[in-house]
């Protein structure tokens, strides 16, 4: 089935009321093509494991679907489906937003938040857990502490896998809500100055965001101590894809003055094997409200949360702080992801919205 020349404008003021007017001449339109093209290429496995596999068209397609869900997140379009959430690592926002997304779309949720209460504590392998849960669920949302676990699960599971974070590797659903937040606040994804601050070594959210932005001509600024700098493989990825970047160790009001997006990250204690090293770097970069005096009017501060000490509470009341709204956007982005991997199309969502 083809969607003949049917375009959706991702920049209309009604779509993104927070968009700044200075960006009104920059907008995206994209043409819906066949379902087979815009959905994951492998129709036998629609899993979302890494953001790197998504084309520019697919990213914009998912953002448009998220916009539709923001209009009305309460539907029955997933009625009768079962979503399994398997969290081998702790989570608050990711787990709750996925479960809320499923519930608000009419699905039922099963799963666990502590692997100690499952048979994995008895020695059951990840493969066996995945195969067993696949008997009960239409889709599996999984967070795991091992890098590559989601990829492996997608290769053995008969149902789609959504990667909710695998170690220090990837976090594609977080990236989709980050992109949605950036678009809502900037009115574009093109030609932005994006500053990534803090734990760039283990931060899976910044790794995924970097890969997703390859389509949109960003300039990245990596601000990190030597111990937590962006891994060489991601800098190589930037060079191979023509992504401009600069590296900094100083975090001052002058350093961030030209930022469109300031993406703060937590130094993750759970990733360190040497706690002395963690103590040495945990508070190296802290954002205070007075550091924002020289920044651009359109600057927005993002953070995947939870925060520890890296953003002081006085920043929360600054209109440039957007991290709590960013978390809310996760609901709409994850509703889009769940529907997409289940084969529910944007056209289905639009038609369903007419019934609401």
Image: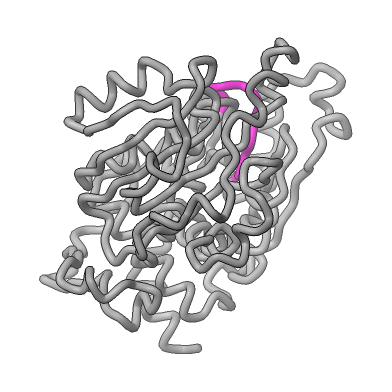
Can residue 2 be seen from the camera position used here? no
Question: Which residue is located at x 26 percent, y 78 percent?
Answer: 12
Residue 142 part of the magenta-drawn span: yes
Residue 7 part of the magenta-drawn span: no
Residue 208, picture quadrant: top left
Vertical order, 186 against 262 (above or below): below
Tell me residue 250's x, y (percent). 45, 29
What segment is highlighted magenta in the picture?
140-149
Vertical order, 137 against 223 (above or below): below
Query: Count of labels shown?
Result: 0
How was the colour assigned to the protein in this rendering? one colour
For this orientation, the residue located farthest to the left is: 5
Residue 299, picture quadrant: bottom left
Question: Which residue is located at x 24 percent, y 49 percent?
Answer: 56
Instruction: Judge left or right: residue 170 versus residue 105.
Output: left
Vertical order, 37 against 223 (above or below): below
Instruction: Judge left or right: residue 308 versus residue 230.
Output: right
Q: Nearer the viewer, residue 189 or 131?
A: 189
Tell me residue 36's x, y (percent). 26, 52
Q: Nearer the viewer, residue 349 or 213?
A: 213
Q: Nearer the viewer, residue 208 or 298?
A: 298
Residue 232, picture quadrant: top left
Question: Which residue is located at x 81 percent, y 17 percent?
Answer: 123
């Amino acid at each position: 089935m083809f969607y003949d020349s049917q375009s959706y404008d991702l920049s209309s003021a009604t779509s993104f009321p927070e968009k700044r007017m200075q960006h009104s001449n920059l907008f995206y339109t994209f043409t819906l093509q066949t379902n087979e093209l815009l959905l994951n290429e492998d129709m036998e496995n629609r899993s979302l494991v890494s953001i790197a596999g998504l084309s520019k068209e697919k990213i914009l397609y998912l953002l448009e679907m998220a916009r539709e869900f923001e209009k009305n997140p309460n539907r029955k379009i997933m009625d009768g489906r079962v979503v399994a959430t398997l969290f081998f690592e702790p989570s608050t926002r990711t787990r709750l937003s996925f479960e809320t997304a499923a519930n608000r779309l009419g699905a039922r949720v099963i799963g666990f938040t502590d692997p100690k209460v499952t048979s994995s504590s008895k020695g059951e392998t990840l493969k066996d857990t995945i195969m067993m849960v696949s008997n009960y669920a239409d889709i599996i949302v999984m967070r795991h502490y091992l890098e590559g676990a989601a990829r492996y699960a997608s290769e053995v599971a008969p149902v789609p896998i959504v990667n909710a974070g695998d170690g220090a590797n990837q976090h594609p659903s977080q990236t989709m809500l980050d992109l949605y937040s950036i678009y809502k606040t900037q009115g574009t994804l093109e030609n932005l100055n994006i500053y990534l601050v803090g734990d760039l070594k283990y931060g899976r959210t910044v790794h995924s965001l970097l890969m997703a932005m390859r389509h949109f001509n960003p300039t990245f600024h990596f601000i990190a101590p030597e111990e937590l700098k962006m891994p060489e493989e991601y800098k190589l990825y930037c060079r191979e894809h023509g992504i401009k970047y600069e590296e900094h160790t100083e975090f001052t009001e002058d350093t961030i003055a030209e930022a469109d997006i300031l993406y703060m990250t937590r130094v993750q204690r759970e990733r360190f094997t040497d706690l002395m090293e963690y103590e040495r770097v945990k508070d190296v970069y802290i954002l205070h409200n007075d550091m924002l005096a020289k920044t651009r009017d359109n600057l927005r501060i993002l953070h995947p949360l939870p925060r520890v000490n890296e953003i002081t509470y006085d920043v929360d009341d600054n209109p440039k702080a957007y991290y709590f709204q960013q978390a809310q956007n996760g609901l709409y982005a994850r509703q889009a992801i769940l529907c997409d991997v289940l084969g529910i199309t944007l056209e289905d969502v639009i038609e369903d919205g007419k019934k609401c």
